[in-house]
Image: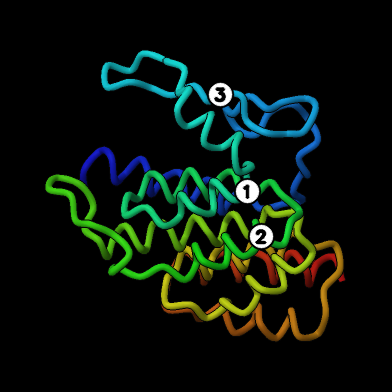
Amino acid sequence: MSARRAGVTASIFLAASAVGSAVPVDGDQVGDLRLSQRDGTVLSRPFKGREGEEKSHEDEGSSVGAIGVVPFYRGLLSSPRCEDKLRALEVLARFNDDAAFQGLQDGISVTAGDFSDVPGEQTAGESADTVRSAAAAALAQSPYPYARPFLRSFEDDPLPAIRLTVLKMIGSRRTHTSADFTYLRRKTIDSDPVVASEATRLLRAWTHVS
């Protein structure tokens, strides 16, 4: 596994492990975007150059400012680059907004055909798995009221990282239904050992509290 792929994979599992209450956007920043205090449009966005130096990405800042943050990053999801899609999901996860939620839905629905293979990096299929896993984590963190119910529909997704994110999302709730307990018991025998172990841990904790 390349260092680049390992880093991306690690970030996904860190995101899945951090599932909890999302914080709506109410400050003057969205990630590393500098926003206008007046209308929330983007003034500029710093970025790392090829040598790692930070520069001011005025062209992108102008584009975002012209159409708005959410429309711009929804458009960025159409890029064939994995990094662009991950960046878009990171930003869209912070908005309680219909269009942002649609973007997260689009993110979890990507396929290998939405990417271009890059020699020495992830394959298109691996990129699709990476972005879908990140989209699941973004849905779990989103302040949009229908984001988590939508994510629940992926509880049996083929990707273990997505199943783990759904499991942690349910486990983070303060109250649990009988359906939650049934789901948890079923996941204790999940084909993925990490998912099964987490389900067993949560079930023991819930039973103890009950």
Foreground residue among 25 and 37: 37
Q: CA distance from mark 2 to mark 1?
A: 7 Å
Count residues near mark 3 (Cα–Cα under 10 Å), then give few for <14, some for 14-19, many for 20+: many
Give the residue drawn at x 61%, y 34%: 65
Q: Report whether 181 appears left or right of 175.
A: left
Name the element at disc 3.
Answer: strand
Under mark 3, the amino acid is Ser
Under mark 1, the amino acid is Val
Q: CA distance from mark 2 to mark 3?
A: 22 Å
| Nearest to N terminus: mark 1 or mark 3 | 3
Pointers 1 and 3 in contact (CB under 8 A)? no
Count residues near mark 1 (Cα–Cα under 10 Å), then give few for <14, some for 14-19, many for 20+: many
Q: Report whether 12 appears left or right of 104.
A: left
Residue 44 shows which numbered tag? Answer: 3
Q: Which residue is mark 2?
A: 99
Name the element at disc 2.
Answer: helix
Q: Where 190 sits versus 102, above or below?
A: below
| Nearest to N terminus: mark 2 or mark 3 | 3
